[in-house]
Image: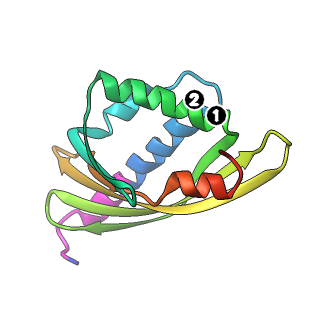
Amino acid sequence: MIYFIGMDKRIQQLTDFFNLYAYRFNNAIKGESPDIEGTAESFSNCFVSANPLGVIGGSNNEDFRTAMSQGYAFYKSIGVTSMDIVSLEITILNEFHEMTKILWKCSYTKKDSSKGIIEFENFYFTQTKQNEPKIFAYITGDEQAVLKENGLV
């Protein structure tokens, strides 16, 4: 790992960044007005998402914002009640880039009122310029398969 001056500050900045990201998600699924613009500002102008089904390039545009709204509505409709960070590991790659591994805890309540938890890891790649991190890539597992295994879809 390469250490730079102010590394502790960068790690705290990224921790705060992802805590705010989780806060916005939770507000959106709890019925509060989603902060679509705030979430969109967490991403660079273009970004890459990868999962076992493939790799997709995206643009931070109106279609992305619409997809976010639909995603929040989807999670809410299947009973997701919270998405909390269990842990995060930040690796400073160089003076502008970082990789953050987040262990998420997804709590849900099914239509039959049974409750459960799913834990999963995602990897986020950020670029920090002018003290402002932006997600430019993220890697996830097969979310749809996990939701199906747990009877949510």
How far apart are the alpha carbons under marks 2 and 1? 5 Å
**Which residue is under mark 2?**
73
Residue under the image location 34 percent in, 32 percent down: 40
The residue that appears at 64% across and 25% down in the rendered structure is: 31
50, 21: nearer the viewer: 50
**Helix, strand or loop at mark 1:** helix
Circle 1 crowding by C-alpha within 10 Å: few under 14, some 14–19, many from 20: some
Q: Is residue 144 above or below residue 45?
A: below
Q: Is residue 130 magenta?
A: no
Q: What's the residue type where badge 1 is placed?
A: Lys
Magenta region: which residues? Answer: 2-14
Left or right, residue 120 beside residue 65:
right
Which quadrant holds residue 80? top right
Quick check: marks 2 and 1 in contact, CB under 8 Å? yes
Q: In this rendering, would 95 be left or right of 80? A: left
Q: Amino acid at mark 2?
A: Ala
Picture coordinates of residue 11 (x, y %)?
33, 61
Asked where in the image residue 132 lies, by quadrant, the reply is top left
Name the main secondary structure of what is drawn in magenta.
helix
* Residue at the spot of label 1: 76
Residue 51 x %, y %: 38, 57
Q: Residue at x 52, y 54 (%)?
A: 143
